[in-house]
Amino acid sequence: MRYTEFMKIFFGLLLILFLAFSGYHLTFRRFRLPLFARRFYLTGIEFLFLGILLGPQFLNIVDEDTRRGLEPLTALLLGWTGLLFGFQFEMARLRRFAFEFLSAAIMEGAIAFVWNFLGIYCALSLFFSLTGLMKIMLATTLASVAACTAQTGLALLPRDSVTRHRDTLKLLTCISNINGLIPLLTFGVAFLFSPRFLITTNIGRDIMGGFGLVLLYTLFLTRHRKESELILIVIGMAVLTSGTASVLHFSPLFANFFVGCCIVNLSNEKDRIFNILISVEKPVYLLILVFLGVNCHFSIDLASALMLGSVCFCLWRSLGKIFGGFAISHLSRELKRYPHRLGFGLLDMGGLSLAILLDFHHGFLYEMTSHIIGMILMAVVFNNLTSYYFLRQLLNSSLKQQSTMP
C-alpha cells in the first residue's frame, strides 16, 4: 500500500470516528424542535446523509479505495452489534417474560419475514433476470431487513401517554427486542450459500472453530477481572470473531450473535460485559449509518425506479407488520385484550435492520447491492416519517378499547 493511500485511509478513519463520537453527545437528546425535525434527530438519520456527503458521489473523502481499507472497522461494528443483540437472549431473563409475549414476538417476526420474502421474491422474478440462488439470497436479506422492529418512536411520546399505555408498550417493547431472532437466523443461513463462502468453507471445521472460540472466551472469563482487563477481553472477542468471519467470507454480525448468546448464558461476568457493550451502542449505531451512507449510490437514471421501489417496499412491509400484529392479537386469550391494530406500533426499523443491510453489502459483492442499499435507505426515511403517527393511532385505539371493556 502506498503512503498516500495509507494516509487517506487514516484520515478517513479519524474523520468518521470524530464525527460519530462528537455527534453522539448531541444526538438522541430532547431538544425543543418541531416534531418533523425531532423524528430525524432522535434516530440519528442525519448521519446517514453525512455518510452520503462524505462518499464518492459528493465530496469523495471516503472513496472506493478508502472504503475497502476501512472494511475491518465495518466488520468490527457489525460484530459489536451482533454481540449486543446476542446478549438479549439470556435464558434466565427470557423466562421472566410471559410465554404469550415470547410466542407473540417469535410469531410476529416469522410472519413478517415470510410475508416480505414472498413479495420480494415475486418482484425479483418479475422485474429482474437473476439466477434462482441469487433471488433467494436477495429476498432473504431484504425480508430480514424488513422483519426487524425497533421502538425509537417511544422517545417522542409524552410521559403521561407512556404511563397510560404501560401494558401495550411493554408488549411492543418485548416484541421489538426478540422478533429480530428469526430474521437474523435466516440471514445467517443465506450466507451459507454465498459463492465467496462456499469457495473457502469447510462446514465441520467452521462449526468446530466457532465452538472453540466460545470455549476460549469462556476460559478467559472464568476469573474475576479488573475493569480494564475485561474491556480488553471484550474488544478482543469482537475483533477476533469479526476478523475470523471476514477471512472466511461469513457474516461478522451472525458469528458474534452466536458468541454473544453463548457467553451470556455461560459467564458470570455477563452483566459487566453487557455494560461495556451498551456503553458504546449509540456511537456504533451512528457509525453504521455513516458507512451505509458511504456505500449508498444514487443513479440519476434510476432515481425514479429506486423511489418507486422504496415506496413499494415500505408499503409492503407495513402491510406485513399490520397483518402480523393482527395475527398475534388473536394468538391466545391473554393477548386478545390488546388492540387488533398492534402492528401499527411495530413499523419502526431499528439498528439491527441497518446492520443486516451493511453486512449484506460487506459480504455479497453484487453490482446491484449499492442500488439496493439506496432503495432501502429511502424506505427507512419514509418509514421514519410515518411510523410515529401510526403508533399514536394504535394508542388512541387502545384507549377506546379500554373504555368499552366492561
Image: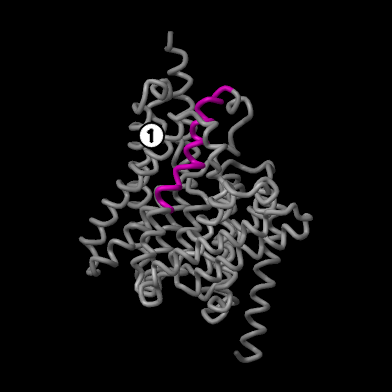
Identified at 53% across, 44% down, the residue is: 89
Query: Splitting the image into 4 quarters, where does residue 69 fall?
Result: bottom right
Look at the image and tell me whether residue 358 can be seen. yes
Crowdedness of circle 1 by 10 Å Cα count: few (<14), some, many (20+)?
many
Q: Position of residue 58 (x, y in %)?
A: 54, 73
Residue type at the position of mark 1: Gly
Identified at 42% across, 31% down, the residue is: 342
- Secondary structure mostly seen in magenta is helix
Instruction: Name the quarter where the C terminus is drawn.
Output: top left
Specify whether residue 45 is painted magenta: no
- In magenta, the rendered stretch is 164-184
Farthest residue, direction bottom:
2
Q: Is residue 210 above or below residue 160?
A: below
Frontmost residue, 86 versus 208: 208
Look at the image and tell me whether residue 370 can be seen. no
- Relative to 404, 8 lies left or right: right
Which secondary structure, mark 1? helix
Identified at 56% across, 53% down, the residue is: 260
- Relative to 68, 236 lies left or right: right
Frontmost residue, 288 versus 334: 334
Specify whether residue 170 is painted magenta: yes
Identified at 69% across, 55% down, the residue is: 24
Instruction: Name the quarter where the N terminus is drawn.
Output: bottom right
Frontmost residue, 3 versus 216: 216
Q: Position of residue 242 (x, y in %)?
A: 55, 67
Q: Position of residue 189 (x, y in %)?
A: 37, 59
Residue pointed to by mark 1: 325
Q: Is residue 245 above or below residue 382?
A: below
